[in-house]
Image (cartoon, rainbow, N blue to C red):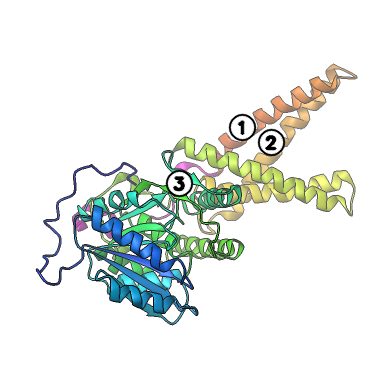
Amino acid sequence: MRTDTPPDVLPSRDHLPATGRDVPVPVLDVVIPVFNEEKDLGPCVLRLHDHLARTFPYPFRITVADNASTDRTPQVAAELTGRVEEVRHVRLDQKGRGRALRAVWSASDAPVLAYMDVDLSTDLNALLPLVAPLISGHSDLAIGSRLARSSRVVRGPKREFISRAYNLILRGSLHARFSDAQCGFKAIRGDVARVLLPLVEDTGWFFDTEMLVLAERAGLRIHEVPVDWVDDPDSTVHIVRTAADDLKGVWRVGRALAVGALPLDRLARPFGDDPRDRRLTGVPGGLTRQLVGFCVVGALSTLFYLLLYSGFRTFTGSQPANALALLVSAVANTAANRRLTFGVRGRDRAVRHQAQGLVVFAIGLALTSGSLAALDAASAHPAHATEVAVLLAANLAATVLRFLLLRAWVFPEGNTAAPSCSATLHDPRNAR
């Protein structure tokens, strides 16, 4: 995935369609999906048109995609169409941002397709850097990223937390390498869209994420642009419902990828074989990635253990509650490390991995318990600080030992890689 910014020099348009003097074919079609936006639609479209007229050197079009609005949005869109030559209006009978984008992008004749939210939360100065690599043919998709280091973002802590947590989930569960799935500022080449969009099932907010995951798994090149972004306090997006739908989408796409149900071989490699993409469905790349995954899973497992212990403790003693909580959390820990840290998919050897995981857990438990027993044997009444220090050292050693055993014995690298996508997908002879 490319994260560098495009060159300052405008890209050549030699490969783009020719334009006539009277009716030029737009090089860029910017779609604005709207639902009941009668107040903001007019000013935002005019502001976008003014920006494109001043800064974009090629013919362009702005398409207002009305998602079955029930207010005056259709009338406002019609007025804009009559007032501004480059604006058109498409009316849909059903709601759904993904449905609107699929409908307009699939019918557009522009070689580069983009979309942005009607509130224009993203600074429009990032638009040309977003589409330049697609105009030049360098990249296949481009996304604005609010999570890049050089991005400047103004939004509340709640939305910030949700955004970062969601992208962390994507990285852990689907091995996504792009940084911001839900920023409403994206672009795609028209020829890529015609092949990719039929594979995307979602018609709502998860549309973006599903499109990006499938594109990345197919080896397409995704360009990221840092953006300046200001949160719209009047946004009508229902955060909880959207988050729940997104998690359902993550589960559906992850399951489809795991069983090989997606025909990703329809997408040809556009730039030849890239060794970074050869094992996207296998082991997450490198020791560092595995260590990060192991630490995240360990932290979540600890929280899970505490919740289980508190629940079991309400109807049983401390020792049985501790044993049950440790057992259940150990099984969950092994399953999570199997899938997220070491990239093992499917049910093959799942029981064996769980049995080995319990052995590893028992070894770590014996190490910590043995350390306490040795301390008690050495001193009849050890100081509390000494006891805590011994436990910390023992747990650290047990954690390191657990990771090494999981990596070398339970999930050895040579046996954990799942079958990659079709050989046709990665054959450089099929590159266009």
Q: Give the range drawn in magenta.
A: 411-432
Tell me what residue is drawn at x 34 percent, y 45 percent: 276
Q: In this view, does 353 lie to the left or right of 361?
A: left
Q: Which residue lies under the disc numbered 3?
A: 283
**Could you tell which of marks 3 and 1 lies nearer the N-terminus?**
3
**Residue ranking furthest to the left:** 21
Residue 213 x, y percent position in the rendering: 41, 57
- Name the one closer to the observer, 113 or 293: 113
Q: Is mark 1 on a helix, strand or loop?
A: helix
> Which amino acid type corresponds to the residue marked 1 in the rendered image?
Leu
Q: Which residue lies under the disc numbered 1?
A: 401
| Residue 424 falls inside the magenta stretch | yes
- Name the one closer to the observer, 155 or 139: 155
Tell me what residue is drawn at x 38 percent, y 49 percent: 279
Q: How crowded is mark 3: few (under 14 residues within 10 Å), some or many (20 or more)?
A: many
> Which amino acid type corresponds to the residue marked 3 in the rendered image?
Val
The Cα atoms of the two marked residues, 3 and 1, are separated by 20 Å
Q: Is residue 113 something that shows in the picture?
A: yes
> Which amino acid type corresponds to the residue marked 2 in the rendered image?
Ile
Q: What element carries label 3?
A: loop
Of marks 1 and 2, the one in the foreground: 1
| Residue 338 falls inside the magenta stretch | no
Tell me what residue is drawn at x 44 percent, y 82 percent: 93
**Residue ranking furthest to the bottom:** 93
Mark number, residue 363: 2
